[in-house]
Amino acid sequence: MKLDEFTVGQVFTTKSLKLTKEAIMEFASEYDPQYMHMDEEKAKQGRFNGIIASGIHTLALSFKLWVEEGAYGEDIIAGTRMNNLKFAKPVYPGDELHLTVEVIDKKPMRNQTGILTVLLSTFNQKEEKVFEGELSVLMNQ
């Protein structure tokens, strides 16, 4: 979709993705090697009672699900900013994540481009919000 085809208030819903313990640990070993993501015994003794996904992993999966929804298509040029990121609840192995994505702003610019801003809200299978953040992208008009 081109920038002009989006409307403020428009809402999209993505497919779901189930997160495995192996995926959590693999991501953490590469990008966030902290005990709560990798060490089952130590994590069980912590505040979350077990392994949890890295917030960065949750963010990356949220972005993946949104991009795979296909609304941007070939009209996206580049991401420009992320604001107001909130990791609301931990994500556990076995959680199934999906998003609602609301268009919250669009600003046409010169040269047939503009900035589209969406609010990503990620939920688990219990409909508990686990992540929220604003994403702005440069798009063709």
Image: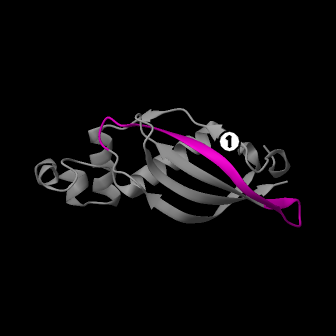
Residue 107, compared with residue 53, is above or below; it is: below
Task: Identify the element where label 1 is drawn.
Answer: strand
Residue 55 position in % (x across, y down): 39, 56
Q: Nearer the viewer, residue 70 or 14?
A: 14
Q: Is residue 71 left or right of residue 141?
A: left
The residue pinned by badge 1 equals: 11
Q: Is residue 134 left or right of residue 46?
A: right
Identify the residue at image location x=73%, y=44%: 10
Among the 4 quarters of the image, the one containing residue 31: bottom left
- Mark 1 neighbour density, 10 Å: few (under 14) some (14–19) many (20 or more): some
Identify the residue at image location x=27%, y=40%: 21
Q: Is residue 109 left or right of residue 48?
A: right
Which image quadrant: the N terminus? top right
* Image label count: 1
Q: Main secondary structure of the magenta part?
A: strand
Residue 117 position in % (x across, y down): 69, 58
Q: Is residue 70 magenta?
A: no
How is colour applied across the structure in the image? one colour
Q: Nearer the viewer, residue 45 or 126?
A: 126
Which image quadrant: the C terminus? bottom right
Identify the residue at image location x=31%, y=37%: 20
Identify the residue at image location x=73%, y=48%: 9
Q: Nearer the viewer, residue 36 or 127?
A: 127
Residue 139 position in % (x across, y down): 76, 56
Query: Which residues are the magenta region?
Result: 92-114
Q: Nearer the viewer, residue 133 or 59?
A: 133
Furthest residue in direction right, as rendered: 111
Q: Amino acid at mark 1?
A: Val
Q: Is residue 111 magenta?
A: yes
Among the 4 quarters of the image, the one containing residue 74: top right
